[in-house]
Image (tube, rainbow, N blue to C red):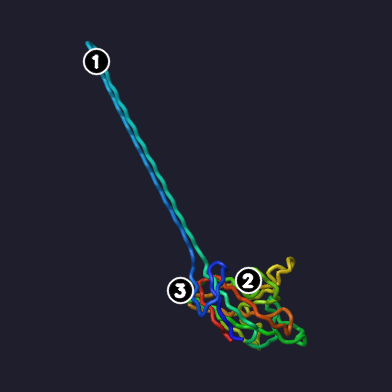
Amino acid sequence: MMKRWMCSALFLFAACDGCDPEAVGEGEGEGEGEGEGEGEGEGEGEGEGEGEGEGEGEGEGEGEGEGEGEGDDVIAVVGDLDDGTYFRTFASCVPRAFENEGAFGFDMWTVSNASDVDVEITATTSDVGAANSCAIDTMIFAYGPSFTPTAPTTSCIGGNDDIDADAEISCSTITTTVPANGSRVIVVTTFEAEASFEYQLNIVGPVTVSPAG
């Protein structure tokens, strides 16, 4: 099955073809200030006497308002583990000793940073069309600069099995840094060998994403 894109801001997803994510942020600020001052003075004198009157009034008003809004780019892509099979490592990038358990299907996604500064991204798997739902059981890895299925420990930055094993949240998440004008490869695979399903990969960060396989 061909991979497809779903784009959004703040995890409100809508299907589209080759969409370009944008950060969404809103902010408003208003400030008002008023000041009034009045002064009156009267003096009268008859015969011998003096009268003076002074009045002073000052008023100051200040108002400041600031509003800032920031929204992270969110890119959602859908895959079905059809880039091939390999003998995956543990989440720590340590090789597994039990290759007779079977091969693991995987997908590769290239995450590219076109800016002149390093950026941090977070990649999280979920059920298709539901960024906060997780009935699937994935594993996710970050590689840099490339991924070689026949050498899965090479260039392995790190991996993750479950977002929260105690809570039985079996989707996966990883945070990594994409270097300036560089890229990382995100590999999505399965916890169980020979498993197959569709999944959604949600990537937060000012990057672009494309299939690497």
| Secondary structure at numbered mark 1 | loop
Q: Which residue is mark 3?
A: 116
| Secondary structure at numbered mark 2 | loop
> At which x and y percent is residue 129?
61, 73
Distance of label 2 from label 3 (alpha carbons) = 33 Å
Above-or-below relation of 203 to 106: above
Confirm or deny contact between disc 2 and disc 1 (CB under 8 A): no
| Secondary structure at numbered mark 3 | loop
> At which x and y percent is residue 72?
52, 67
Confirm or deny contact between disc 1 and disc 3 (CB under 8 A): no
Label count reads: 3
Numbered disc in front, either 2 or 3: 2
- The first of marks 2 and 1 along the sequence is 1
Numbered disc in front, either 1 or 3: 1
- The first of marks 1 and 3 along the sequence is 1
Q: Which residue is mark 2?
A: 130
Q: Which residue is mark 1?
A: 45
Q: Residue type at mark 1?
A: Gly
> At which x and y percent is residue 113?
50, 76
Q: Which mark is residue 208?
A: none
Q: Residue furthest top?
A: 47
Q: Nearer the viewer, residue 155 or 53?
A: 53
